[in-house]
Image (cartoon, rainbow, N blue to C red):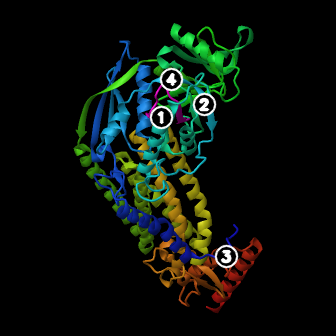
Amino acid sequence: MATDTRRSRPVRTIVLLTILTILLPFGALLAGWQLDGKSSDNPDGASLAPGLALDLQGGTQIILQAVTSDGSEVTPEAMEEAIGVIRQRVDANGVTEAEIASQGSNQIVVEIPGEVDDETIALISKAAQMKFRPVLTVGNPIPTAQPSASPEGSGDDAGAKGDENAEGDQSRAELEKKAAEEAKDVDPTDPSDLAQVTPAVQQLFDQLDCTDPKNLQGGGGDHPDRVLVTCDQTGAAKYILGPVEVDGTDLTSAASGLVPGANGTVSNEWGVTLDFNSEGTTKFRETTERLTPLEPPRNQFAIVLDGLIVSAPSSNVPITNGQAVISGSFTRDSAATLANQLSFGSLPLTFDVNGQNQISATLGAEQLQRGLFAGLIGLALVVVYSLFQYRTLGLLTVMSLIVAGAMTYVVIALLSWGMGYRLSLPGIAGLIVAIGFTADSFIVYFERIRDELRDGRSLRLAVQRGWLRARRTIYAAKAVNLLSAVILYFMTVGGVRGFAFTLGLTTIIDVMVVIWFTHPVMELLAKVPFFRDGHKWSGLSPDRLDVEPRYRGAGRFAGSKAAAVDTPSAGTPDRERELVSAQSVASAPRVADDGRRMTIAERRAAERKAAAEAAQNEEKH
């Protein structure tokens, strides 16, 4: 096995790890706590403690009652789509551990950690209906101009420090107000007239950043008689749209399937079929007749749900029978998703706040105490095992666990401040399980070192070669853990995702600690006489490892068994001397003095030499 000839700098590695992964993040968190601390007026500010989820902190429960203006029945499919829209609004700014579920046939229960203001309640309960608008302009999702101050010149620069978000919202609100005033002086010939793109509308479009999650939460202003500046639902593009031409209530049905081909054959292309009522058929015919001859992108019509664009297909031919087909780069799943969204948008569905209650965390607090108690027991068992199995070397396991715990705490606290992440009870379970997974890495490494010592190598070489062998096993095991966490996170919802998130996070931190802390510290310990010479309490003593004696020449062997295989005394019986001679030959060295493994020829020569010296010693006695 080839050894790593690169120069090792363990002290520098440990210092860099401490600065980059603990001191700097904690310093940023401390500065944020001082400058943007969490309070009743600033619930999203920084805190030295991670945010807690609903099951640990309690929060607000909002019951929404779904109603239809035309008295039609609320279908389960519409409720599922409504839950998806509300979840998108709630989770737009990061992981919040909110719980959203249906209750009965026409109620949705939304449970949000902490206190909820009136603005959030209004955003959650706002109706989300489908609208069809003509496309005027399409652009890249990023801003094309730096945000400026308000049109009247009041306020500070939008990029200045301070209440930046509030100022940006005020600037957009003022621009929207100005755009509404400018629209009074515009007399468009049709909804696709570019004269509707006034200077205020263009400025709104230039400043819009569709890569910002807050602009993808939906529920924004969507006045049917005005132009709309908004984003694609995925944040891939931004649009300027004309006034509403067809409302979602004019859509009777939407279904996904394979698009019909020429001569009535079925193609292998997935699409969505739309059916309009009589009023919608007339509106859609007039719209497609006007859009079809226009240049791109003005020949497109946007399907808007909850203020965001879910699709913007082109009009290739006028649709006169009220039956349209949307085709393109659809898969079976994406076509079904769009069909469900269109079906939901066709219902005149709105939500009334039917109740609002405060939820206590009594049950979660009790479970948290038990969980933390179980975690402390597990940690204590790991420490006891490490000290029993590895003596003083086991303290390195304890130190590594402390470093991993500090890194995990700082990262979760930063995520709680920056992304709205909240630590739930399943997330804490993931942290507890990670204790054993993290200790596994150190055990694998230590056992590889002990294997190298059993082969007769010095501690310095054993650390170097043992690390080269151990890291392959560590990488493979952690890759499996990380893959499992990723699959759990994307295939599940709710509390299981919290467990998967913390499990994946601790797996990454585990690899960082064992590479940049445990191994460098072990390199330093290899230079300490207490460990290098194999003290009996070091965990690396020859007696404890049952190390084979190393041949030093002239019938002498080094190691714990040297006294047993040295020259026998004069009073030793002949049979015992024969056994000693045979043992001398069997114990001939397999490793040279420089730590290199002997070739077969060298080993045979050493065996013959050992046998000859043993025979000479017997003749003398």
Residue kind at label 2, given as amino acid type: Ala
- The earlier-in-sequence mark between 1 and 4 is 4
In front of the other: 155 or 311: 155
- The earlier-in-sequence mark between 3 and 2 is 2
Q: Is residue 225 magenta?
A: yes
The residue pinned by badge 4 equals: 131
Position above or below: 188 against 465: above
Q: Quadrant of residue 385?
A: bottom left
Q: Which numbered disc covers residue 181?
A: 1
The residue segment tinted magenta is 219-231
- The earlier-in-sequence mark between 2 and 4 is 4
Relative image position of residue 77 (x, y in whole percent) = 44, 20
Position above or below: 48 against 462: above
Residue at x 38%, y 30% (from the top left corner): 126
Asked if labels 4 and 3 touch by Cβ distance under 8 angstroms, the answer is no
The residue pinned by badge 2 equals: 195
- Distance from the alpha carbon under mark 1 to that under mark 3: 90 Å
Residue kind at label 1, given as amino acid type: Glu
Q: Which numbered disc covers residue 591?
A: 3
Going by the image, does 366 lie left or right of 206? left
Asked if labels 2 and 3 touch by Cβ distance under 8 angstroms, the answer is no
Relative image position of residue 436 (x, y in whole percent) = 43, 56
Q: Secondary structure at mark 1?
A: helix
Position above or below: 404 against 350: below
Residue kind at label 4, given as amino acid type: Lys
Residue at x 71%, y 14% (from the top left corner): 261
Q: Kindly report which numbered mark, 1 or 3, lies closer to the viewer in this rendering.
A: 1
Rendered-image quadrant of the N terminus: bottom right
Residue ranking furthest to the bottom: 620
- Distance from the alpha carbon under mark 2 to that under mark 1: 14 Å
Q: Secondary structure at mark 3?
A: loop
